[in-house]
Amino acid sequence: MQSRPPRRVTAKHLGVLAMAAALALGVAPAAAAHPGKHRPPADAPLTTPWTDQVGPDNALPEYPRPQLRRERWQNLNGAWEYAGGATPPDREQRDLGERILVPYPVESALSGIQRHDDHMLYRRDFRVPPHWRGDELLLHFGAVDQEATVWVNGERVGSHQGGYTSFTVDVTDALRPGSRQQVTVAATDTNERGRYPIGKQTDTPGGIFYTGSSGIWQTVWLEPVSRTHLTELNIHRTSKRRRSGWNPRSAAHEP
């Protein structure tokens, strides 16, 4: 699977990164270990007046990609099963043991985990509306730091490297009959021990270096699309002639 090409960094993107760094430092509180409930940890470094208002039902609910907004979509942010540690967790275990609030980095208090794990495993169920059947179904990840592998109903559907770029996998062929499905994501982030750009993230924060933002740290969402659909739109301006133009990129799949 090929990921999308890197996007130009704008002030908006820098703002998102700054927010993620703040969350990683524990600026926001934690979601509780059980879906539907929210309780900040006693040792959260810093809380805000909005601490108690954040939970599985409103974790970044807005559509994450305004440039190509589609009316039909499903937000998968919220409570996921979670397991993590120094070695990869067993993907076959029945219960992963913990709950995490996606899409907040595992180091953040808001995630409910508030520690660094080199290896992370996420899992949750989702339902496909009946009127989406017959369309292609795309699963989008805003960002996963640093390596990610994705399975749907136990079938591997894609992988991605790099924690700063989004990626999309087509999960149509992995869907089971009926509406209930399951997605699993394995992520690896070894900070400065790895081979990816990390900025000032480190295992031992202090001074100008700060806590990392590992795992799923931007919105996860589903979209049904037709077999031929737009995947990217680049808007540009020709300064010499003072004209604007646009270059759409589409995808087409054989039946």
Image: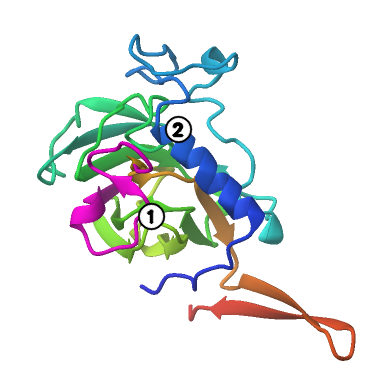
- Residue range in magenta is 183-209
Residue at 38 percent across and 42 percent down: it is 208
Q: Earlier in the sequence, mark 1 or mark 2?
A: 2
The amino acid marked with disc number 2 is: Leu
Q: Position of residue 246 (x, y in %)?
A: 75, 79
Using the rendered image of the protein, determine whether residue 111 is visible from the camera's viewpoint: yes
For disc 2, the marked residue is: 23
Colouring rule applied to residues: rainbow
Residue at 47 percent across and 40 percent down: it is 20
User: Is 123 or 30 nearer to us in this picture?
Assistant: 30
User: Is 152 or 148 nearer to us in this picture?
Assistant: 148
On residue 125, the disc is: none
User: Is 15 or 80 nearer to us in this picture?
Assistant: 15
Residue at 60 percent across and 67 percent down: it is 226
Q: Residue furthest top?
A: 42
For disc 1, the marked residue is: 199
Residue at 23 percent across and 42 percent down: it is 203
Asked if residue 199 is among those painted magenta in the image, a careful observer would answer yes
- Please say if 136 is above or below 56: below
In the picture provided, is 218 more to the left or to the right than 11? left
- Please say if 239 is above or below 157: below
| Mark 2, other Cα within 10 Å: few <14 / some 14–19 / many ≥20 | many
| SS of the residue under disc 2 | helix
Question: How far is disc 1 from disc 2 in space, using C-alphas?
Answer: 16 Å
Q: Position of residue 193 (x, y in %)?
A: 18, 55
- Please say if 83 is above or below 9: above
- Please say if 87 is above or below 2: above
The amino acid marked with disc number 1 is: Gly
In the picture provided, is 248 more to the left or to the right than 214? right
Could you tell me if the residues under marks 1 and 2 are in contact, i.e. CB atoms within 8 Å?
Answer: no
Q: Position of residue 25 (x, y in %)?
A: 40, 31
